[in-house]
Image (tube, helix red, strand yellow):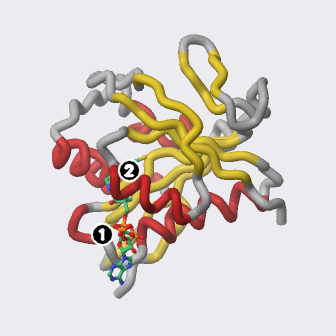
Amino acid sequence: MPAIIRPWRPEDTPGAVHVVKSVFDEYGFTWEESGYHADLYDIQSHYIDADHEFWVAEEDRRIVGTVALETFPRLPGELGSVTRVGSQPRVAGADCSLERLYVLKEARRTGLGGNLVRTVLERAAQRHKTALEMWSDKRFGDAHRLYARFGAEVVGERICHDPDQSPEWGLLVRLAAT
Ligand SMILES: CC(C)(COP(=O)(O)OP(=O)(O)OC[C@H]1O[C@@H](n2cnc3c(N)ncnc32)[C@H](O)[C@@H]1OP(=O)(O)O)[C@@H](O)C(=O)NCCC(=O)NCCS
């Protein structure tokens, strides 16, 4: 059965954690349950209650992929430049972001990652968002080819506040309103 993408439900939490943790283990990145990854253990308050959205991909009753959309007021500055919000570099002019795109290794290269990205972009446009930011570890080359196919432009770089202090590209997708 091909994977279906659907909104997160509370019982999906262990499966969503498993997907993201498997990718972190695969790349040898540090896992931080009560810090950088705390959002995954409380998706209700981090995403749903904050008017963001979180989806899972389910295949044969197993969670094999995740993605999230965060929405916020337009960040100050000229669209496509990099601005600073608190201590963090961000994409100026963005009013939403794609977060937590992960697919289990064994479920990759069937189009699922692309479908998860499309889910976020379509929903953002439905919500009248105009510019989506993504920050992505420079070592995730598969993701960068995928994002480029959706028109993402690299607009900046930063050091992530994750435990590994990972270098990241900042990307922008200009959204067409629906
Ligand atoms: C990035 C990621 C989500 C992509 O997931 P995916 O399910 O493999 O994505 P897709 O299947 O849509 O596309 C991946 C590749 O498979 C190809 N593909 C898609 N369907 C295919 C099919 N039926 N047969 C053969 N190849 C196919 C795509 O053309 C793409 O090719 P490319 O590597 O040359 O760009 C996944 O690799 C991943 O989780 N990586 C680690 C974490 C990560 O990078 N996350 C992003 C954080 S910002």
Q: Secondary structure at mark 2?
A: helix
Residue name at image x 72 percent, y 46 percent: 131
Quadrant into which the C terminus falls: bottom right
Residue name at image x 65 percent, y 51 percent: 173
Q: Nearer the viewer, residue 69 or 154?
A: 154
Judged by depth in the image, the label closer to the viewer, 1 or 2, is 1
Q: Is label 2's Cβ within 8 Å of ligand 1? A: no
Q: Nearer the viewer, residue 27 or 51?
A: 27
Q: Position of 139 compared to 128: left or right?
A: left
Q: Can you identify the residue that label 2 sits on?
A: 13
Residue name at image x 59 percent, y 48 percent: 153
Q: Is label 1's Cβ within 8 Å of ligand 1? A: yes
Q: Residues within 10 Å of mark 1 (few under 14, many from 20)?
A: few
Q: Amino acid at mark 2?
A: Thr
Q: Position of 143 compared to 115: left or right?
A: left
Quadrant into which the N terminus falls: bottom left
Where is residue 89 drawn, in percent x and y? Answer: 56, 22
Mark closer to the chain start, 1 or 2? 2
Q: Amino acid at mark 1?
A: Arg
Where is residue 156 drawn, in percent x and y? Answer: 54, 32
Compared with 80, 15 (above or below) is below
Q: Secondary structure at mark 1?
A: loop
Q: Can you identify the residue that label 1 sits on?
A: 108
Which of the 4 quarters of the picture holds residue 72?
A: top right
**Label 1 to label 2: alpha-carbon separation:** 21 Å
Where is residue 20 drawn, in percent x and y? Answer: 31, 48
Q: Nearer the viewer, residue 58 or 27?
A: 27
